[in-house]
Amino acid sequence: MENKRRLVLVPCPLQGHLSPMLDLATTLHSKGFFITIAHTQFNSPNPSNHPDFVFLPISDGLTENDLLSGDFLDFIATINTNCEGPLKECLVPMVDQVACIIYDTMMYLGETVANHLKLPSIILRTSGATALAAYGAMPALQEAGYLPLQDSMLQELVPQFYPLRFKDLPLGISKSLESILQLLSIVCIIRTSSAIIWNTMDYLEHPALEKLRQDHQIPIFSIGPLFKFASTTSSSLLEQDSNCIPWLNNQAPNSVLYISLGSLVSVNEREIAEMAWGLANSGQPFLWVVRPGSVLGSQWIELLPEGFEEVIGERGLIVKWAPQREVLAHGAVGGFWSHCGWNSTMESFCEGVPMICSPNKGDQKVNARFISCVWKVGLELVNGLERREIETVIRKLMLDKESGEIRQRAADLKEKVELCVKKGGSSYNSLNDLAEYILSL
Ligand code: UDX
């Protein structure tokens, strides 16, 4: 029975990548496939949350230095180099049972190992299609002399990429432009993989998906948001503090601003103070996730400005990590101030929560621009983290009549997501096509 129904999934060991891969695993398991998760020891998922899967820990050889270097691309390159040999070795004994290897874009060793074992491979893209298209445009922009970016060009529109400005290009994930372009040459070009699974919806990113379909000439299955098909099993690497739910139960409908900058972004002492005073001066109730270690130079919230505890006592709650999907689904939450990581963006869309956009790097900047200018369900903080603008934008989103249209569009978007994932919807159909496709390999 198991013959050729086993799928080996290779997630990238970062929260925003791991969750959609595990959601995909749960979804494909419900379609009758057997699942093996080949994962690094670093940020290992918790097997007890997924008793139906086989977990295969791969020796990643990461040193303390690799984890602290801070350069995302060096980190990705090291994992790929270190894990290739161990993954091959682990898979050799089971190769006859495996239908294909599904790997995260960043874990391109998945393709090399699949070729070595003469197995088909499929890519999972965990970020938006528009952002990938923006990455894909960068080599040509460099050739045309636009990169490295000049300050004088930052506010200008990128040719043929309306409404993206040069400042929105997905840079900032590495100190060196050369290493970004080098990674792009690996992740944007499809070499031998047979198909792409995309954690997005046709409705949302139709133009970018169409362009990518024309360029790539292999099947692209857009089956997002993946978590809508998966059970509610948590794949959180940090413990989620559920005490915020009873606190939210005591707040008025749509009154609370939820704030989270995701699993990777850090802020400095000045920025956390600007955020705190902007929040304080807005007068709005808030639930704020401050991830331990995310404020540079401190363990947790030691660097919050003096006097801010009183504001918390009056109308705020700070937690280390929240059950974010549950929070966004709570009726008391009326806005989400986010770094616009792709998972957070889709989770907000699913619950119809309008956003305040504070992108930091990479795809977040593209997502933020589209949230505010194309999907029009959020407001952008144009001056980074600055208290007066924060106060104004919070009031505008949470209190002004003007924001009624944004709120309505967010509610409409929620309905569209529901249509995509329900029977006959584009993501629902695409998921069934994917299952058939895998069986045909
Ligand atoms: C990173 C990049 O920043 C992002 O741009 C890219 O698209 C994916 O990788 P990350 O910072 O982890 O993502 O943000 P995001 O993609 O939004 O994922 C964060 C996940 O953590 C979400 O699924 C969110 O629900 C979860 N989360 C966040 C919690 O469970 N609790 C929290 O308190 C905060």
Image (cartoon, helix red, strand yellow):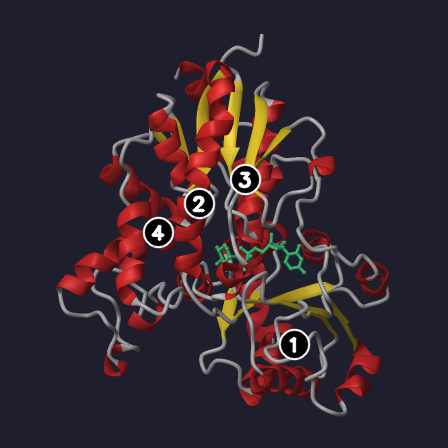
Amino acid at the residue labelled 4: Leu
The yes-or-no answer for disc 4 within 8 Å of ligand 1 is no
Amino acid of disc 2 = Asn
Q: Which mark is residue 399?
A: 1
Marks 4/1: CA–CA distance: 35 Å
- The residue labelled by disc 2 is 82
**Disc 3: CA contacts within 10 A as few (<14), some (14-19) or many (>=20):** many
**Distance Cα–Cα, label 1 vs label 3:** 38 Å
Residue at position x 53%, y 86% from top? 386
Q: Residues within 10 Å of mark 1 (few under 14, many from 20)?
A: some
Q: Quadrant of the N terminus?
A: top right
* N-term mark: 2 or 1: 2
Q: Secondary structure at mark 3?
A: helix
According to the image, label 3 marks what residue? 21
- Select label 4 or label 2 by which is in front: 2
**Callout 1: helix, strand or loop?**
loop
Q: Amino acid at mark 1?
A: Leu
The residue furthest left is 144
Of labels 4 and 2, earlier in sequence is: 2
First in sequence: mark 1 vs mark 3: 3
Give residue 28's position: percent from left, percent from top.
56, 27
Question: Toward the viewer: 30 or 102?
Answer: 102
Q: Mark 1 or mark 3, which is nearer to you?
A: 3
| Chain-order first, disc 4 or disc 3 | 3
Q: Position of residue 331 (x, y in %)?
A: 75, 58
Question: Along the line of sight, which residue is nearer the eye, 41 or 197?
Answer: 41
Q: Earlier in the sequence, mark 4 or mark 1?
A: 4
Tag 2 near tag 3, CB within 8 Å: no
Return the residue at label 4: 132
Question: Is the C-beta separation of discs 1 and 3 under 8 Å?
Answer: no
Name which residue type carries label 3.
Met
